[in-house]
Image (spheres, rainbow, N blue to C red):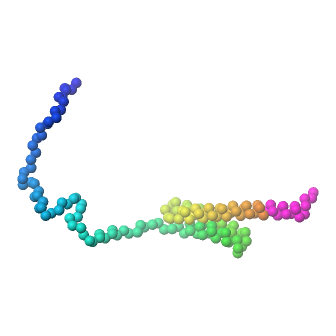
Amino acid sequence: MQPRRPPPTPHHKLTAVSTAPGDLPPPPSPNTPTQIAGQEVAPTNMVPPAPAYAPAASAPLNTEALASFVLGIVSFVAHVPIPVIGGFVVAVIAVITGYQARQTIRRTGERGMGFATAGMIIGIVHLALLIVFVIVTIFVIFAFGIVIFGFHR
């Protein structure tokens, strides 16, 4: 067991601490304003120059990704010069280049993942719309054939 200490008294004696007069800093002159640490003694009119920052070196844009995006959009217009097949081929190329661009971007760290993904999505949506169009067209041809020629056995 540890011995008990007496409870602290409210008045403790402090030991004297002293500094030699030669070690003290000189007192401030009465004309000197009080200065807070980090504050200027007198305000200046000069604005400090802005730090010169070099623009951040960004990774180059992947051209396959941009090509995929552009081809995805152009695939909707490519039906004009070559009906049905033109848009289909361009949409397939948009999907393939988008997939290749995403693989390259993951490997090299280039920019353009959004372009590659958008090109793939636009190409896939276009292909899906073409498939729906073909199915509806076949259904309409059979329906009109039955209406016009009748259903004979």
Q: Pick whichever, 129 or 82, lies toward us.
A: 129
Q: Quadrant of residue 125?
A: bottom right
Q: Quadrant of the C terminus?
A: bottom right
Whether residue 134 sits left or right of residue 16 in the image: it is right
Whether residue 15 sits left or right of residue 91 in the image: it is left
What residue range appears in magenta? 138-153
Residue drawn at 14 percent across, 36 percent down: 11
Give the farthest residue toward the left. 21
Whether residue 127 sits left or right of residue 50 in the image: it is right
Give the farthest residue toward the top. 1
For the stretch drawn in magenta, the main secondary structure is helix
x and y percentages locating residue 38 in the rendered image: 24, 60
Residue 100 within the segment the image draws in magenta: no
**Number of on-image labels:** 0
Give the farthest residue toward the right. 153
Residue 147 within the segment the image draws in magenta: yes
Q: Is residue 100 visible?
A: no
x and y percentages locating residue 114 in the rendered image: 55, 63
Image height check: is 24 above or below 123? above
Q: Quadrant of residue 45?
A: bottom left
x and y percentages locating residue 146 in the rendered image: 87, 61
Q: Quadrant of the N terminus?
A: top left
Residue drawn at 18 percent across, 60 percent down: 34
Give the farthest residue toward the front. 30
Q: Is residue 53 visible?
A: yes
Residue drawn at 33 percent across, 68 percent down: 51
Residue drawn at 53 percent across, 65 percent down: 112
Q: Pick whichever, 143 or 39, lies toward us.
A: 39
